[in-house]
Image (spheres, rainbow, N blue to C red):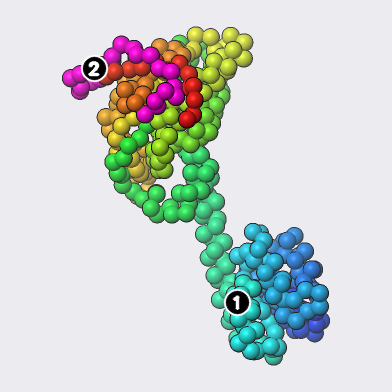
């Protein structure tokens, strides 16, 4: 059996039993698994139940022509990338054009040369195999991406992964969020390691869900803190607003978790900082090990805002507040000092989101 024929399945569609048997004999001898159908409706049922790797389809059949079968296969997401070869006694340019317009990938005339037929079959199956490998890679990549990104953002990145996932960084405006569980060090002293891990997993699952719900990018867990950002890899005019909305929802979710814990989470509070500004964003590390993250002063200021927040408080910077307009209620707080800066940073405590317009 040829290496490229292993486990590859071919569907043969022809209303003439002799043609079906002849094609099946050729292809079975070549090592392919074959299924047969005597009309278009049966072919579509078989293809839907178990999509083949290639279809050989006669053109002239009762009730449903081969062209109609081809169009139906190409219009079905489950079979749209399955190669279709039209097999017919008709050899005019018009018939070949009709086959192409129906979506056929090749055209073979009867009586066919078995060597030529097998050559075309092998060529199309190699293309199909490459497509399947790319699809498998994309599925794996999508699974990885959706751990860090909202699903719709991951889908956009997969349209041009080389552009979005290459090693290196760029400077761009972003909004950063840090959320830290205040009082967790004392919590770990009172509970077993398993209880600590289960609690962190429960809280982190909810917080990351909120990040994705508001189209944010998850960056990392840092001890008992979560870091996320908006504006990369895809930017939106509402990045700052979405980040603050996420912060407000996180606060509510955390309060709800504490209330439902039966006192187990008493003494814990969620402190959140949000800052907007330019940062270096990209895949930082090496070709083998890289981390999609952001670095820069904007990140440092955000972390400092989070550290200055009390339990249950959301502190945002002047740069973030300026992008919110009247859509968020925020009150001025005491300015905070940031290492390396001569002037303190203005801070605002967030109350609630009052509108999306």
User: Is 336 in the magenta?
Assistant: yes
Q: Residues within 10 Å of mark 1 (few under 14, many from 20)?
A: some
Q: Decide whether residue 123 is among the magenta residues.
A: no
Image quarter of residue 14: bottom right
Q: Which residue is drawn at the image coordinates 61% and 75% (left, top)?
A: 101
Residue toward you, 331 or 211: 331
Eyeballing the image, is 288 above or below 208? below
Give the percent coordinates (x, y) of residue 336. Answer: 28, 15
Q: Which residue is mark 2?
A: 344
Q: For residue 24, say whether it is visible.
A: no
Q: Which residue is mark 1?
A: 100
Residue found 55% across the figure and 71% down from its top: 126
Q: Position of residue 32 (x, y in %)?
A: 67, 73
Visible residue check, residue 143: yes
Real-space CA distance between mark 2 and mark 1, rounded to the nearest whole angstrom? 69 Å
Span shown in magenta: 323-344
In the displayed structure, 209 sits above or below 283; it is above
Image point (72%, 64%), residue name: 47
């Amino acid at each position: 059996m040829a290496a490229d024929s292993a486990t590859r399945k071919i569907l043969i569609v022809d209303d003439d039993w002799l043609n079906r048997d002849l094609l099946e004999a050729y292809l079975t001898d070549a090592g392919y698994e074959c299924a047969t159908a005597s009309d278009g409706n049966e072919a579509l049922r078989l293809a839907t139940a178990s999509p083949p790797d290639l279809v050989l389809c006669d053109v002239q059949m009762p009730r449903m022509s081969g062209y109609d079968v081809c169009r139906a296969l190409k219009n079905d997401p489950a079979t749209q990338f399955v190669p279709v070869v039209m097999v017919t006694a008709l050899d005019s340019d018009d018939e070949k054009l009709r086959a192409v317009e129906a979506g056929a990938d090749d055209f073979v005339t009867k009586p066919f040369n078995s060597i030529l037929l097998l050559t075309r079959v092998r060529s199309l199956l190699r293309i199909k195999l490459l497509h399947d490998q790319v699809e498998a890679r994309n599925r794996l990549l999508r699974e990885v991406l959706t751990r860090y990104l909202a699903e719709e953002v991951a889908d956009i990145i997969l349209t041009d992964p080389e552009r979005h996932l290459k090693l290196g960084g760029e400077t761009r405006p972003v909004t950063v969020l840090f959320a830290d569980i205040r009082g967790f060090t004392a919590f770990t002293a009172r509970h077993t390691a398993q209880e600590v891990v289960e609690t962190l997993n429960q809280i982190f699952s909810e917080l990351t869900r909120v990040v994705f719900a508001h189209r944010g990018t998850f960056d990392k867990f840092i001890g008992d803190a979560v870091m996320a950002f908006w504006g990369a890899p895809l930017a939106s005019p509402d990045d700052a607003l979405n980040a603050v909305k996420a912060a407000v929802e996180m606060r509510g979710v955390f309060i709800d978790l504490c209330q439902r814990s039966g006192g187990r989470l008493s003494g814990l509070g969620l402190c959140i900082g949000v800052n907007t500004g330019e940062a270096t964003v990209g895949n930082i590390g090496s070709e083998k090990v890289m981390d999609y993250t952001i670095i820069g002063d904007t990140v440092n200021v955000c972390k400092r805002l989070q550290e200055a927040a009390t339990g249950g408080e959301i502190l945002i910077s002047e740069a973030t507040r300026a992008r919110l307009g009247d859509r968020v209620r925020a009150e001025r707080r005491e300015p905070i000092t940031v290492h390396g800066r001569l002037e303190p940073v203005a801070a605002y405590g967030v109350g609630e989101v009052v509108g999306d317009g």
